[in-house]
């Protein structure tokens, strides 16, 4: 049984990575994911300048998932570009560089820096951060998405993916796919957290996190049906040249299998990684292998995107 997968010409020994934002803000955390059974690692979304992020408590694990309003805390673009270039030199498992500018200008400035750098790996432009106060998500504004992609592809010739939020209406998938299919995108990553949920502690009669009146992105089991639907909807609508990373609600090998069945090329783990740590990747590869063995599949291509219709 082989778990190898590739995305935009980059080969992964297995399809599993962390989700941007989880266990990836420092070189130590990034190294721990690379040292684990993960097939690769993605950096915390970078802003041009380092950021402290929102006030604490800003993350809460829950029985069915998690809520977070981190507010984009990160070491800054230079730190993550340096890490990505160093690990490209060392030929480790692939490092995906995630970017989340606070403005279109910042997005373009960081993309120009990557274009001029030695980094030739995958770049993930995060258009779906729900937690920066006062900053509406780009990805729910289709004109803004068109602007950033128009301007980026004027000069960017490397491998560019975008991180999308969950969409909840088929007309949105139709409209946005018509836009995305115009660009030489490496992939779309679906989904980011389900934005602006509210989790309350009935004992204290307060929200469980402090920023934004307790409003934060929801992850984990809560979002798996929405994540699978987004992966499937993009696979059905996007050019085959545009790959898909499936993110959302992955806790077991069966969850990984389901994302692949819906069409994912790679699968990312957020909430479950936050609670279990990088050892989860050994468990998930073992469990995925077991699912494939039971079903008689030898490679991911044997079943990727082959969800049957009823
Ligand atoms: O609050 C965050 O840092 C954050 N949290 C999320 O759940 N998704 C994101 O894209 C980001 I940039």
Image (cartoon, rainbow, N blue to C red):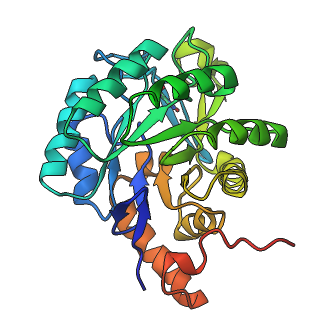
Is residue 202 at least partly visible in the picture? Answer: no
Q: How many marks?
A: 0
**Rendering coords of residue 105 (x, y %):** 43, 13
Task: Give residue 31's position: percent from left, percent from top.
Answer: 21, 48
Residue sitting at x 61%, y 16%: 136
For residue 173, above or below residue 93: above
Q: Residue at x 47, y 53 (%)?
A: 268
Q: From this viewpoint, is residue 182 visible? A: yes
Q: Looking at this view, is 164 or 34 the one in front?
A: 164
Q: Based on the displayed image, in which of its 4 quarters is residue 36 positioned? A: bottom left
Q: Is residue 115 above or below residue 309?
A: above
Q: Residue furthest top?
A: 134
In the picture, residue 38 is in which quadrant? bottom left
In the rendered image, which quarter contains the C terminus? bottom right
Farthest-out residue, right: 310
Residue occupying the far front of the picture: 154
**Image position of 300 (left or right of 263):** left
Of residues 141 and 297, which is closer to you in this image? 141
Q: Quick check: 17 above or below 100?
A: below
Above or below — where is 308 with respect to 280?
A: below
Quadrant containing the N terminus in the rendered view: bottom left
Q: Residue at position x 68%, y 73% from top?
A: 306
Give the residue displayed 33% in from the left and 56% down from the top.
40
Residue 308: image x %, image y %? Answer: 77, 74
- The x, y position of residue 236, in whole percent, is 72, 57
16 or 78: nearer the viewer: 78
């Amino acid at each position: 049984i082989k778990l190898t997968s590739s995305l935009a010409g980059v080969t992964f020994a297995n399809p599993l990575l962390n989700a941007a934002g989880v266990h990836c803000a420092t070189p130590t955390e990034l190294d721990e994911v690379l040292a684990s059974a993960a097939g690769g690692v993605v950096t915390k979304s970078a802003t041009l300048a380092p950021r402290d992020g929102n006030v604490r408590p800003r993350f809460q694990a829950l029985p069915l998932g998690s809520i977070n309003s981190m507010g984009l805390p990160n070491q800054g673009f230079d730190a993550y570009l340096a890490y990505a270039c160093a690990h490209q030199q060392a030929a480790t498992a692939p490092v995906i560089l995630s970017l989340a500018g606070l403005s279109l200008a910042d997005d373009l400035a960081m993309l120009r820096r990557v274009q001029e750098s030695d980094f030739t790996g995958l770049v993930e432009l995060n258009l779906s951060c729900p937690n920066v106060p006062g900053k509406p998500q780009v990805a729910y504004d289709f004109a803004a998405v068109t602007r950033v992609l128009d301007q980026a592809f004027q000069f960017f010739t490397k491998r560019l993916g975008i991180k999308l939020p969950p969409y909840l209406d088929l007309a949105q998938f139709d409209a946005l796919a018509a836009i995305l299919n115009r660009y030489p995108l490496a992939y779309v990553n679906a989904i980011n957290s389900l934005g602006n949920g509210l989790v309350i502690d009935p004992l204290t009669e307060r929200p469980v996190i402090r920023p934004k009146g307790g409003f934060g992105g929801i992850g984990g089991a809560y979002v798996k049906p929405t994540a699978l639907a987004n992966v499937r909807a993009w696979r059905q609508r996007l050019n085959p040249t545009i790959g898909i990373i499936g993110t959302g609600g992955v806790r077991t090998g069966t969850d990984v299998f389901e994302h692949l069945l819906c069409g994912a090329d790679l699968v990312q783990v957020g909430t479950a990684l936050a609670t279990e740590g990088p050892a989860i990747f050994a468990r998930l590869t073992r469990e995925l292998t077991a699912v494939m063995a039971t079903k008689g599949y030898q490679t991911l291509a044997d079943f990727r995107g082959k969800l049957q219709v009823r």
